[in-house]
Image (cartoon, rainbow, N blue to C red):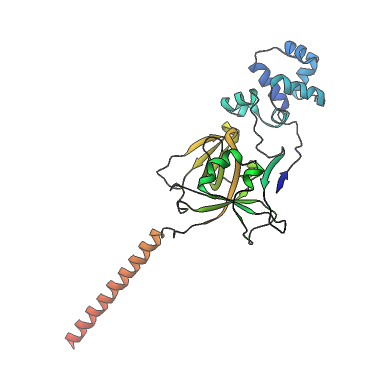
Amino acid sequence: MTLFLSYTDNFNIMIHFGSNIQFLRKRKKISQEDMATELGIKRSSLSGYELGNSEPNFDTLMRFSEFFKISLDKLLKLNLQSVSEVYLKQLEQGIDVDITGAKLRVLATTVDGENEENIELVPIKAKAGYSAGYGDPDFIKVLPTFQLPFLDRSKKFRTFQINGDSMPPVSDKSWVTGEFVQNWNTIKDGYPYIVVTENEGIVFKMIYKQFDKNQTLLLCSTNPIYEPYEINVNEVNEIWKFVNYISNEMPEPNLNRDQLNSSISGLQRELREIKNTLRKKEAETD
């Protein structure tokens, strides 16, 4: 048993700091004088920060972060005036999900006798348990495993059994293999992913990012009878990018191509009948 670890350093750039602290101060309906007193800085310094004429040191930055209860990363780099009220309230409540994967994420996994990472299988009967035990090495090590030699061994893959008819041509009970997604900003809109959630369990859907709007993912099915729905990223535990799937059912034929072939066959048949009719008339004339 081993642990798959990933860490990425996050370099903060002071892009929106001045406008953000001014916006948040006015949102709290507090004057520059009172806020400067709360932070233990001069009013002239606060005015300079808001106008972007000067930059605070790290200690002062941390005071702003603690005062507004918003992470330093968001305070510096995210335009808080452009986000939704729902998202902003979440930030103010300390609900700040690591979208980028910059913080340490630990993924329990297994290896074979040659120390190569396995692909673990999560059957339907284990899906409920996986939502709670996805990070538990004792749970992961009892899952069935296999290898797909044509996959990139430098990446982590896992296979989930899908139930339902919401994602044709992937049929019910198919096995869908996904690549672990560390940075959720790399999600491609309109591409299929396996999403492990706290409340929904394991779902296989087409995804659209809505991080800047309201910190949600829009989940869509390829079957039009299922309505799209949103899920807050706070409820998401893991995301796996679709790689391939295995099914014991043949996918539905391409109806448009079949109809085209049928039309061509019909035209060919009619052409043969016309030629035969012309030959008969020519024979009768002779």
Q: Is residue 163 left or right of residue 63?
A: left
For image coordinates 78% across by 14% down, the residue present is 43
Foreground of the two, 109 or 101: 109
Instruction: Evaluate whether residue 254 shows in this view.
Output: yes
Dividing the picture into quarters, in which one does residue 92 lie? top right
> In the rendered view of the protein, which quadrant contains the C terminus?
bottom left
From the viewer's perspective, tell me whether residue 8 is left or right of residue 57.
Answer: left
Instruction: Work out whether 17 lies above or below 185.
Output: above
Residue, far left: 284
Would you say 124 lies left or right of 63 here? left
Q: Position of residue 176 (x, y in %)?
A: 54, 52
Query: Percent position (x, y) of residue 269?
Result: 29, 73
Q: Is residue 151 above or below residue 95?
A: below
Residue pushed farthest bottom? 286
Taking depth in this image into account, of 5 and 232 the one nearest to the observer is: 5
What residue sits 72% from the left and 39% below the top?
104
The total of numbered circles placed on residues is: 0
Q: Position of residue 184 (x, y in %)?
A: 63, 41
Residue at 66 percent across and 25 percent down: it is: 94
Which residue corresponds to the image point at 38% horizontal and 63% vertical from the top-left? Answer: 258
Residue 50 appears in view: no
Report x, y in % for residue 82. 61, 29
